[in-house]
Image (cartoon, helix red, strand yellow):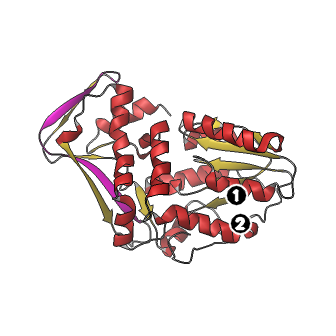
Amino acid sequence: MDMKKEVVIGLQSTPKYLPAWYRYDNEGSRLNDMCLEKNENYYFHRCELGILQTHISNMLGLDMNNSVLVDMGSGNCQKTRMFIDEILKTKSHLAFYPVDISHEMLLDTCKKLSDEYAEQLDINPISADYETGIAEIKQYTCSKLILWFGSIQSLEPDDQVRKLKLVKSVMTAGCSLIFSVDITQERDDIMKAYNDFHGRQLFMNFIWRLIREEKCTINPDNFDLEVEFIKDDSADKMSSVQVIFRAKRDNSFTLPTLGITVNMAKGEPLYLHDGPGISHKYTPTQVQTLIKRAGLQLVDKWVDNAEHVR
């Protein structure tokens, strides 16, 4: 993926947008970790951890003796460490393939893992977007346990299906995929999770990254940051958190490194995601539809006590 080209396409589209993944450079990854730590109302991460702490032994039904571990959107590998620890209880060595779009974050995490696990963990970092990462993993024909926690729901709905189909294409006999989705439907819970100070700082990293990397002349004071929950119970769609940088007045800004000027009219939205939302929320029927459309087979499922995560 040509990241700069994707940014230009988004800013020249109608309506204008920035791809959801753009917030995750090294600074965005740091802000995301801070959001998970500081926002007591951000339920998703804690509920994921709760499920893993309770059910991880049941999740490891795959024989890992001749298998490798793959982590899509690895981040700081907090959840993945739980799998590594569990696997290494019965295995002396594990090959691990973390995939992350933030190169700096990936290298920093891999160094920490290398220091922690030494010869027990053979780390093969893949600094790439999901599609490129999946293509690279395809060359390994051994059985794989593929983890994909949380980030699939930040993709545009049709792209979720497409990426899951790509994952399916690299799964040979004995492979398993474990992924998580947000099944919360309560607006108050969702707004507290996404519209707090730390969440808004993470969203602002879209703009700060434009300024840092592209020397963008955008003035944040010319915009309001809006966060809203859009509910949709349709079987083939899903609810979503929508994030908009809306112009308070007519203004324009240039991106010298990309060679473009962007004109914004008063009230015009700049969406901080491609597709209907930056994070999607699912009903059980929508989860089933997603799995069916991707051509996958549901073997088991786990839900936290508060029914936030599945």
Between 178 and 237, the one nearer to me in the picture: 178
Q: Which mark is residue 297?
A: none
Q: Is 10 contained in the magenta span? A: no
Rendering coords of residue 202 (x, y %): 39, 47
State the residue at coordinates (83%, 60%): 63
Task: Please identify the quarter of the rendering in which residue 49 is found.
Answer: bottom right
Region in magenta: 238-258
Which quarter of the figure is the C terminus placed in?
A: bottom right
Rendering coords of residue 84 (x, y %): 74, 53
Judge whether residue 186 can be spotted in this image.
Answer: yes
Q: Nearer the viewer, mark 2 or mark 1?
A: 1
Amino acid on which disc 2 is placed: Ile
Above or below residue 308? Residue 95 is: above
Amino acid on which disc 1 is placed: Met
What secondary structure is found at the residue carrying circle 2? helix
Task: Please identify the quarter of the rendering in which residue 114 is found.
Answer: top right
State the residue at coordinates (45%, 42%): 28
Rendering coords of residue 64 (x, y %): 82, 56
Q: Is 242 contained in the magenta span? A: yes
Q: Pointer 1: residues within 10 angstroms few (<14), some, or many (20+)?
A: some
Q: Which residue is mark 1?
A: 82
Q: Which residue is mark 2?
A: 56
State the residue at coordinates (29%, 28%): 216
Rendering coords of residue 78 (x, y %): 62, 53
Outermost front residue = 38
Between 5 and 51, the one nearer to me in the picture: 51
CA gap, disc 2 and disc 1: 8 Å
Cβ–Cβ below 8 Å for labels 2 and 1? yes
Earlier sequence position, callout 2 versus callout 1: 2
